Image (cartoon, helix red, strand yellow):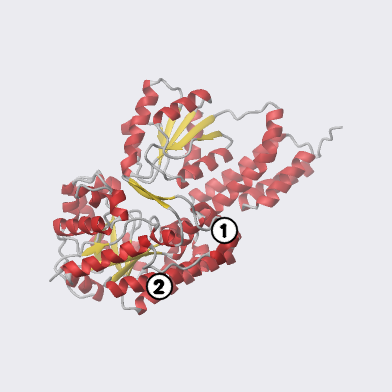
Amino acid sequence: MRTVKAPNDMSEILNTLTESIKAGKRKDAKAATEQALSENIDPQQILAALTMGMDDVGRRFKANEIFVPEVLVAARSMKSSMELLEPVLAESGYTPDHTVIIGTVEGDLHDIGKNLVAMMLKGANFSVVDLGTNVGAQAFVEAAQTHKASLIGLSALLTTTMTAMREAVALFREQGLAAKVMIGGAPITEQFAQDIGADGYATDAASSVDLARSLVA
Amino acid sequence: MTPFQRYQAVLRGEPVDFSPRIPIVMQYAAELIGSNYGAFASDYNVLTKANLHCAERFGFEQLSTISDPYRETAGFGAPIKFHENAVPECLEHPLADLDDISSLTIPDPWEAPRMRDRMEAIRFYREHTGDQYSVLGWVEGPGALAADLRGVSDFLMDLLEEPEACAELMKICVDANIRYAKEQIKLGADTIGVGDAICSQISGAVYEDLIWPEEKRLVDAIKAEGATVRMHICGQTKHLWPKLKEVPIDILDCDHMVDMTAARQVFPAHVVLAGNIDPVSGLRFGKPEDIVEKMRACQSEAGSGFMVAAGCEIPPGTSEENVQTLCQPLPVA
């Protein structure tokens, strides 16, 4: 028998979940998710509570109120919750509205920044397909087509690998991909993004969420 | 005035003709002599040839032994893969499980090939250039080495969740690097660079509680050996300054986003500020006239305790004209 929770109880559980994400308390987040699911709270409301937590983390990161370690523990807490929630969401027929293909471009082995962006995008309820590091342009094309991606995110840390971004964007245009292209990384500038025909550039992981949302709006 | 005399004079607060030039070069220098980054990082003969070539061509005051973050990590047992045109890759972190801290063994710098290679570079410089230049040895700072041993993401999370273990790990890192620094100083390094890039990514509170005590212990030990300390933390460091200013460093490398005027107000006058043109948009892709203007502004903001450098390493592909412009003598008013 399905029991509908009283609004106050429900909001208390979801609030606990949001606060656990914000504080990066993995065990608390997992427990709150388990409780929410056992109480038959709408999985999309649970997801909204998680997203609210990660949005707050992103806002504080952008404002330099918190730093990378706090973002990492928050993202890991969210991942723990999502492992429980995703099967329920899938069962209910829910899928995120947008898929992002992300990776570090060919010749570049750096992944910390790319991983942070992937975590923040997952926290913002994008479906993220992470291709890893040293990813060739053709692999982005194939993944974008396979997953019907709305966005492609390219990362580069080196001035020497920035040029791979230019070649990748050129290939995406040549192949007629519908996905918008966002780029980032230490040497990247707004001017460079414009020069190579990318659709957007973000200075940090939190800003990448704002950019991604604006590109699919 | 030799380059080394000019460098030492600025450190002592004495007048000089122009500001010393101490840019960091790695892949750029390797390619300038027709070699590659992999060879530069793995063979001191290439590293010294490339740095000497740059020093002579552009007028550097300092010869460097920096190549990549993994010399000590390799000493702790990590397998390292060299790439022709990319930073060496750490294939496996020696401390995959934080519970294994007690299994770490402090490396003997003479027995660890990559650590020894840096020492051979220092010996080469002194044997071949005498006291003409400052010779920069290098060790990783406590945060950077701990992150390299553990894996960056894991270590950053450990700082919040396993602070006592992190403190224990960083104590081992600093014990290892005090030993390494002492050996480099014995061979003739007058300056030891401390690279602790990871610190810009953590909060001031975590830095103060966990990293700062070990950072200070490392710097105190290097100073006790009579060497100069050049602190290099990539990125924005302003939130660390309240504690970093209490570490007895001699030179603070300022990345391009650092406000030199603000740094000058915080750090004592005897701390030299080095920097800080944006290596990519300012130096790699910038125009010579803009480079001149930026470096004049840096000197003006930093005052007499100033040395010329880019915010971080000179990127490969930078034109020789731009590096020459960066290094053209900047008279001290």
x 25%, y 65%: residue: B306
Q: Secondary structure at mark 2?
A: helix
Residue B256, image x, y percentages:
32, 54
Res. A197 visible in picture = no
Of residues B264 and A51, the one drawn nearer to the viewer in this rendering? A51
Q: Are marks 2 and 1 on the same chain?
A: yes
Q: CA distance from mark 2 to mark 1?
A: 26 Å
Q: Dot 1 falls on which chain? A: B
Residue A103, image x, y percentages:
45, 37
Q: Secondary structure at mark 1?
A: helix
- Could you say which disc has been placed on residue B273 in the image? none
> Which of the image's four quarters has the N terminus of chain B?
bottom left
Q: In this rendering, is residue B66 above or below A127?
A: below
**Residue B196's quadrant in the figure?**
bottom left
**Residue B177's quadrant in the figure?**
bottom left
Residue B53, image x, y percentages:
17, 56
Q: Is residue B63 shown left or right of residue B233?
A: left
Q: In this view, which residue lies farthest toward the right?
A: A1
> Which of the image's four quarters has the C terminus of chain B?
bottom left
Q: Dot 2 falls on which chain? A: B
In this rendering, the label closer to the viewer, 2 or 1 = 2
Q: Is residue B219 shown left or right of residue A21?
A: left
Residue type, mark 2 in image: Arg
Q: Is residue A63 shown left or right of residue A92?
A: left
Residue bearing mark 1: B158
Of residues B235 and B41, the one drawn nearer to the viewer in this rendering? B41
- Could you say which disc has been placed on residue B179 in the image? 2
